[in-house]
Every structure is written in structure tokens, then in C-alpha cells.
Amino acid sequence: FMVDIGGELRLKGHNDKNVGWRIAVEKPLAEQRAVQKIIEPGDNGLATSGDYRNYFEQDGVRYSHTINPKTGKPIANHIVSVSVITPTSMMADAYATAFTVMGVEQAMRFAEKKQLAVYIIEKQGDEFVEHISSAFLPFVVQ
């Protein structure tokens, strides 16, 4: 089965073709839909948090819809998408949001320390830079 509730997924088993569920992680573009990466999460939960459809820019600074709980202000880092695979979609969603707030370096250090499957897309200028934890790599199909 595959259950999708508000973009958070819980997967188990195979699809009707007896193949493991394959999920496309979207390229973080506001104006179009395209595939960034294909993954096969197995019997797990998957959540992706991102600001590429819900943000604003002011004075050249991009602000997310996600609020930093320490400052009470919108986050203003360069992370545009975070995907996390964990045994439950609830935990995946919590981690994806937390990593969005933490920033790339702190999030990746935490992910490696805790052996979490994390995929972060960061916008640097006009380019997207991928950060993939070692625990996420086995789930990548292409």
C-alpha cells in the first residue's frame, strides 16, 4: 500500500505490478513540475518539506513560510527542499521541517550522526546543490 496524506507518504510492499514503490522527488521550481530524483523508500515513511512554492523575497532576501522557533521569524537560508525517510511518516515530517530550519551543515551533521536518510536541495545562485546523507543513498534509483 501507499498512503499519501498532505504530501507525507507511508509505503509498504509493492505496487500492482509487484515492484517496490518508486517516488519522484520534485525539482524545486515554482513555475513548473519536473523530477529531481527517483527513490524507492521501501517499507517506510517519506516526507518532503520545501519553500519553493511558498516564500517571499524582500530586498534580495528569500524568506520561507517556515518560522524559526528560536527567533520567531521566517527562515532565510538557501534550503529549498528536504526529503527524509524514516520508519514513520510522522517522524519523517518532523525531521524534514527541523532540518529546513537548522540549515545544511547542522542538518547533515545531525543526519550522519543519527544515521538518518536525508536529501537536501540547496539553491546557490541559479544552481541547485544536492546534499545526500549516506543513509539516503541506498534508496536512490536515479
Image (cartoon, rainbow, N blue to C red):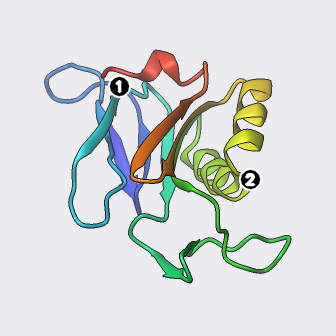
Relative to 25, residue 44 above or below: above
Q: CA distance from mark 1 to mark 2?
A: 33 Å
- Residue at the spot 59% in from the left edge and 45% down from the top edge: 92
- Residue at the spot 80% in from the left edge and 71% down from the top edge: 69
Picture quadrant of residue 135: top right
Q: Are marks 1 and 2 in contact (CB under 8 Å)?
A: no
Q: In the visual, does 72 lie left or right of 25?
A: right
Q: Earlier in the sequence, mark 1 or mark 2?
A: 1
108 or 86: nearer the eye? Answer: 108
Q: Residues within 10 Å of mark 2 (few under 14, many from 20)?
A: some
> Which x, y percent locates residue 80?
49, 56
Q: Report the residue marked by disc 1.
A: 13
> Which x, y percent locates residue 24?
29, 39
Relative to 38, residue 106 above or below: below
Q: Report the residue marked by disc 2.
A: 102
Q: In the visual, does 69 lie left or right of 14?
A: right
Classify the position of the C terminus by image quarter.
top left
> Which x, y percent locates residue 68?
75, 70
Q: Secondary structure at mark 2?
A: helix
Picture quadrant of residue 12: top left
- Residue at the spot 22% in from the left edge and 29% down from the top edge: 15
Which numbered circle lies on residue 122? none
The amino acid type of the residue labelled 1 equals Gly
